[in-house]
């Protein structure tokens, strides 16, 4: 499979027709039905196919996309999943088990459950008094048990 050229990328972006074109080694140039074209990296992690957006075109050139993809592939070879690492960066501010529960309650339980007060009550009565103040990195499987 031949690599794309910058001219081919510009032509695909200008055409505006929805497409997904491989540059090889998991790097794709995607022109969606609506919205701006972008670069994506497809890879396998934990036995699943995953896709990660690298950046928008033309802000990210073909050369930039290739070098960014190489950085993430190097991380993958070292056992670091780039999607999980990216998500962990969003988790700043969660220091204790209490912080983690508050975030989980607000972003998952409250919108999803009909009666989110039930797990909240269980947390307040059973879990918070025992490990609520612990820092996340200090909690062991035995503490959770």
Image (cartoon, grey):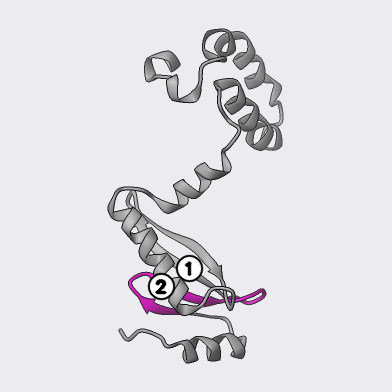
Residue located beneath label 1 in the image: 40
Residue drawn at point x = 34 percent, y = 60 percent = 73
Q: Is residue 22 magenta?
A: yes
Which badge, 1 or 2, comes first in the chain's sequence?
1
On the image, the x and y values in percent for residue 36 come to 64, 75
Residue 128 falls in which quadrant of the image? Answer: top right
Q: Is residue 43 left or right of residue 20?
A: left
Residue 115 at x, y percent in the picture:
71, 26
- Residue 31 at x, y percent in the picture: 57, 78
Mark linked to residue 66: 2
95 lies above or below 11: above
- Work out whether residue 43 can be spotted: no
- Whether residue 37 is visible: yes
Image quadrant where one finds the N terminus: bottom left
Secondary structure of the residue carrying numbered label 2: helix
Q: CA distance from mark 1 to mark 2?
A: 10 Å
Decide: few, some or many residues near mark 1? Use Cα within 10 Å; few <14, some 14-19, many ≥20: many
Q: Residue at x 70, y 37 (%)?
A: 111
Lateral position of residue 42 relative to residue 104, left or right: left
Nearest to the observer: residue 88 or residue 15: 88
| Mark 2 crowd level (few <14, some 14–19, many ≥20, 10 Å Cα) | many
Q: Which residues are magenta?
A: 21-37
CB atoms at circles 1 and 2 under 8 Å apart?
A: no
Identity of the residue drawn at 54% across and 88% down = 10
* Element type at mark 1: strand
For the C terminus, the quadrant is top left
């Amino acid at each position: 499979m031949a690599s794309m050229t910058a001219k081919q990328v510009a032509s695909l972006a200008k055409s505006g027709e929805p497409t997904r074109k491989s540059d090889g080694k998991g790097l794709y140039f995607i022109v969606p039905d609506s919205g701006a074209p972008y670069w994506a990296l497809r890879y396998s992690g934990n036995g699943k196919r995953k896709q990660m957006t690298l950046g928008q075109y033309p802000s990210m050139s073909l050369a930039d996309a290739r070098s960014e993809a190489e950085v993430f592939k190097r991380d993958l070879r070292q056992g670091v999943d780039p999607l999980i690492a990216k998500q962990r960066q969003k988790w700043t501010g969660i220091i204790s088990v209490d912080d983690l529960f508050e975030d989980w309650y607000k972003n998952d339980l409250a919108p999803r459950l009909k009666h989110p007060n039930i797990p909240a009550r269980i947390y307040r009565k059973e879990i918070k008094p025992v490990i609520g103040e612990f820092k996340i990195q200090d909690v062991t499987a035995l503490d959770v048990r």
